[in-house]
Amino acid sequence: MSRQAAHTLVRGAARNHVQRIRPANVRGYAQAASIQDTKPPVALFGLDGTYASALYTAAAKTASLDSTSRSLAALAEVFKKDTKLPIILNAPTLSPSDKSQIVQELQRHMGGQDKGDTVKNFLKTLSDNNRLGILQGVCEKFTTLMGAARGELDLTVTSAAKLDNKVLQRLEAAVAKSDYSQGKKLKVVSKVNPDIMGGLVVEVGDRTIDLSVSSKIAKMNKLLTDTL
């Protein structure tokens, strides 16, 4: 056999070998990437965190993260407008028929944004497991997951009364310049809780700055108690 013929034979054998192993390797790499992409970007705690993480994984596997996020954002708006909704969802007397009607009404508020019925199936799971009461928390925790996936950091500002946008913008600018921001883009979430009585509670990621009046009173009471 000539050198050229041997070279041609070896090259052909190598090409055939690559063709045989390439599909398997591509599938393997794609599968590994898929597994990594479906994992929630941060660990969440609490029952609502567990369900939010499960929903994130399910949505990632079906390439419906954006539509799921929009659907939950729409549901979060419902909670803001209807303060009695959490009470209704937590009612222990809800019958299967009641829960079914509630799920249908929640779907209506999503406005057809639910790609592949991901959120619809999730709501049914919550209903079947008597967990509709954690839906508001799931909406909030899912927002945290999406923000982390985009490289954002939640800046939650809680006040006794609603803050105007200028105040929130000044707070955002101040935190962005500090070490608290970790150099990440901040996503501002404003909450109202009359129980803090005044001042602010600022949460940046997993760090909390408690400047509330209620906190100061609690510290003063403790100081008095310890002294007496």
Image (spheres, helix red, strand yellow):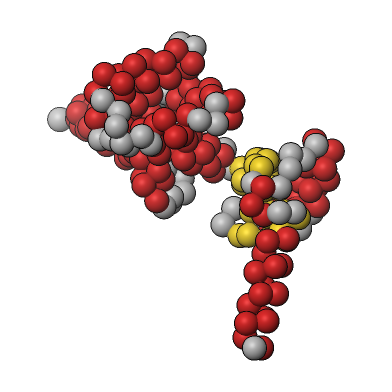
Up the image or down, 176 lies above or below 59; here it is below
* Image spot of residue 130 (x, y percent): 28, 35
Nearest the eye: 112 or 88: 88
Residue 6, placed above or below residue 112: below
Residue in front for this viewpoint, 209 or 6 = 209
Task: Pick the quarter of the image with the N terminus.
Answer: top left
Residue found at the very far front of the displayed protein:
228
Name which residue lies at 74% across and 39% down. 162
Q: Residue extending furthest bottom? A: 228
Expressed as whole percent of the image width and height from the top left, the position of residue 201 reads 68, 55
Quarter location, residue 223: bottom right
Q: Residue at x 41, y 52 (%)?
A: 45
Residue 100: x and y, percent?
Answer: 30, 19
Tell me: 54 left or right of 191.
Answer: left
The quadrant holding residue 88 is: top left
Q: Quadrant of the C terminus?
A: bottom right
Q: Residue at x 31, y 36 (%)?
A: 92
Q: Compare residues 133 and 58 and report the one nearer the observer.
A: 133
User: In the depicted view, which residue is nearer to us: 145 or 211?
Assistant: 211
Q: Position of residue 163 (x, y in %)?
A: 77, 40
